């Protein structure tokens, strides 16, 4: 039998979903990933920003009854949009020290069915500013 996390193959389509936050969203949480199966995984979370100031996003799990914060991700001003600041990997140990790493060095989050991943801004954006969170994940249920 293979060691835990040695071989994971997505058995169904991998989904990529962008979600944008604007000034009208305030600090309201938005769903960024909803697993379709009991064995699902997020394998990347990319965050870009047009904000002129550094922003902070809380990553959380919501099962419909309980919201559990997982950590806060720092997003520098202009990340991935101004040509000088790189896009932010939301799955990094600097912001999320508990994140799991596979044998190839790639971070991931395993999820059960109905364990929706959400993000929310800690402070509202200014008018005209946008933060976009792009998530990729899929199912590895047989």
Image: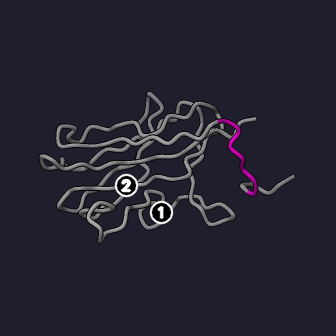
Looking at the image, the residue that sits furthest to the top is 64
| Residue, far front | 83
Q: Look at 50% across and 34% down and name the residue there.
A: 34
Residue at x 42% of width, y 54% of height = 46
**In terms of secondary structure, what is the magenta stretch mainly?**
loop
Residue under the point 18% across and 47% down: 124
Q: Which one is nearer the viewer's eye here, 2 or 131?
A: 131
Q: Which residue is mark 2?
A: 47
* Highlighted magenta segment, given as a residue range: 6-12
Which residue is tagged 1? 92
For residue 65, what is the image quadrant? Answer: top left
Residue furthest right in the image: 1
Q: In terms of depth relative to the viewer, which is nearer, 96 or 18?
A: 18
**Image location of residue 140, percent across then percent down:** 69, 40
Q: Position of residue 100 (x, y in %)?
A: 59, 58
Specify the quadrant that holds the C terminus: top right
Residue 113 on the magenta segment = no
| 10 up-or-down from 79: above or below | above
Q: Are marks 1 and 2 in contact (CB under 8 Å)?
A: no
At a point 54% along the width and 39% down the height, the residue shown is 15
Q: Looking at the image, is mark 1 or mark 2 earlier in the sequence?
A: 2
Is 125 positioned to the left or the right of 69 in the image? left
Q: Which mark is residue 124?
A: none
Q: Position of residue 109 (x, y in %)?
A: 56, 50
């Amino acid at each position: 039998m293979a060691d835990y996390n040695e071989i994971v193959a997505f058995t169904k389509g991998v989904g990529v979903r962008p979600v944008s936050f604007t000034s009208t969203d305030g600090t309201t949480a938005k769903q960024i990933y909803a697993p379709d199966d009991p064995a699902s995984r997020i394998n990347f979370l990319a965050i870009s920003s047009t904000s002129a100031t550094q922003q902070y996003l809380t990553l959380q799990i919501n099962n419909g009854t309980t919201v559990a914060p997982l950590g806060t991700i720092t997003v520098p001003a202009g990340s991935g949009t101004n040509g000088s600041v790189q896009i932010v990997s939301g799955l990094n140990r600097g912001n999320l020290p508990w994140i799991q790493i596979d044998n190839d060095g790639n971070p991931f989050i395993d999820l059960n069915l109905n364990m929706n991943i959400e993000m929310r801004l800690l402070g509202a954006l200014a008018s005209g500013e946008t933060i976009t969170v792009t998530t990729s994940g899929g199912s590895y249920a047989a």
